[in-house]
Amino acid sequence: MSRSIVILLGHPDRDSLCGALAARYQHAALAAGHQVQLFALGEIDFDPILRHGYRQIQPLEPGLEQINAAIAGCQHLVLVYPTWWGGMPALLKGFFDRAFLPGVAFRYRADSVWWDRLLAGRSARVITTLDTPPWYYRWVYRMPGHQQIRRTILDFCGIRPVKISGFGPVRSASEAQREAWLQQAEQLGRQAR
């Protein structure tokens, strides 16, 4: 069954391991017959700072409008980024601050603490690289970046299930280990998971 997939590369440099993981996922998904759009955030011209919070409208740059339209029409969202300082790079966080706005990704209900999840009906795969050993990130740090992306961003907007693949530690990985991670990304792309 063909799916519509949007891939967001949250690493500022396409020529990185994250860039290679995103490309492998994309190529495998296309070969499997899925419709795929890849957006490299480092190549999109936008201000990552939400200058006035929600008090003032800050018009979206054309690149953000294009990504929002693609996400609105997709079934599956794939995020590929490194885990830096326990979480996502500032570029990706800036994207969420600017693009996942009220009325686009969620809507607060009047006189209520509850909200509507406007991106419901989509699933997500997160592929993230770490320099921290995954077991240490899980048991000692308690996965702060995983919790943020899954619970306070994607689930908040209705995107679920969210599955996370963490690859690391990168800095001490052999070429064989990196190739194994690329093959895992390829497998995920074929299955659109």
Image (tube, helix red, strand yellow):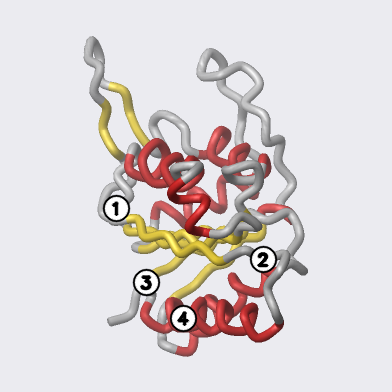
Residue bearing mark 3: 193
Q: Position of residue 44 (x, y in %)?
A: 71, 52
Q: Are marks 2 and 4 in contact (CB under 8 Å)?
A: no
Which of the 4 quarters of the picture holds residue 182?
A: bottom right
The dot on residue 72 is: none
Tag shown at residue 170: 2
Q: Nearer the viewer, mark 2 or mark 3?
A: 2
Kindly identify the amino acid type of the residue bearing the numbered disc 2.
Answer: Val
| Separation (CA) of disc 1 from disc 3 | 12 Å
Q: Marks 1 and 4: in contact by CB < 8 Å? A: no
Expressed as whole percent of the image width and height from the top left, the position of residue 24 reads 58, 80
Cα–Cα span, label 3 and label 4:
10 Å
The residues bearing labels 1 and 2 have C-alpha atoms spaced at a distance of 28 Å
Give the residue number, with chain letter if any, for mark 4: 29
| Residue toward you, 154 or 36 | 154
Estimate the x, y position of residue 43 in percent, counting from the top left.
74, 56
* Numbered disc 2: secondary structure: loop
